[in-house]
Amino acid sequence: MRKDFLAAAMAAGLAAMAVAGSGSAATVIDNMGQLTAHKSVNGSVTAFYTPGAGGNPGVLTYDFGATGAEGAFTTTQASTTGALDLAFEFQIVGSSLSLVNADAINPLKAGNALGAPASIYVTSGLTGPVVLGASPFSHDALANTNEAATPALTLQPGAYFEHITGTISPGTTAIPNTDINVGAFAAGAVPEPGEWALMLAGIGMVGGAMRLRRRQDASPAALRS
């Protein structure tokens, strides 16, 4: 029994060490609010990474701006590598929307660039499934930014999460930081199947009325009058 206890304790200790050394951490979420037709939702964050001493996990500090629905707030998480997985939530209510894109911009300055693999993707629900992505960040030399955008897609009502991944450089005396601006834009509402049926029926009725009017105009009685 003593051997079993020691084996279990050793296994638990190794598991704890593996988790501590993996650098993985829970996703940090900011709520951007409800996305509506011909509108956009936006969020922003400044991330700082302070590495740990002696192989211990460091700390990622996230300073969210006031652009999201939650307003400004700051939160932290443990990290051994400076790798981040941020999730910006937005909601679609009522009817489907045609999403033009979900995008992210990383303005560049010294120590500010997101390291590889930096990408953007969108999930339905926090843990999936993935509905858009992953689209990598690319450098825009003219604007001096790293930018990424997803393709267009029709999204049903529900909660969606725009994920940003990548790594950031450790802080030094100057405390380099990484700024990320995030957004999603919808072109318009997408008609539901019942609405399509009504629209087609309406078009058919208009077309029938126009054909009937042409026949009446071309009848002998109409020509004699």
Image (cartoon, rainbow, N blue to C red):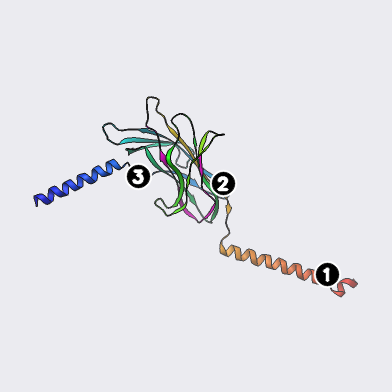
State which mark lies toward you, 1 or 3. Answer: 3
State the residue at coordinates (27%, 44%). Answer: 19
Q: Identify the mark nearer the N-term, 3 or 2.
A: 3
Q: Which residues are magenta?
A: 147-172
Tag 1's secondary structure?
helix
Mark 2 crowd level (few <14, some 14–19, many ≥20, 10 Å Cα): few
Q: Nearer the viewer, residue 91 or 83?
A: 83
Q: Which mark is residue 142?
A: none
Q: Which mark is residue 217?
A: 1
Number of numbered markers: 3
Give residue 133's position: percent from left, percent from top: 47, 50
Q: Is residue 67 left or right of residue 7?
A: right
Mark 3 crowd level (few <14, some 14–19, many ≥20, 10 Å Cα): few
Q: Quadrant of the rendered structure where residue 194 is?
A: bottom right
Tag 2's secondary structure?
loop
User: Please, what is the three-letter code of the amino acid marked with disc 2?
Assistant: Lys
Q: Which residue is mark 3?
A: 26
Q: Identify the mark nearer the N-term, 2 or 1.
A: 2
Q: Nearer the viewer, residue 46 or 90?
A: 46
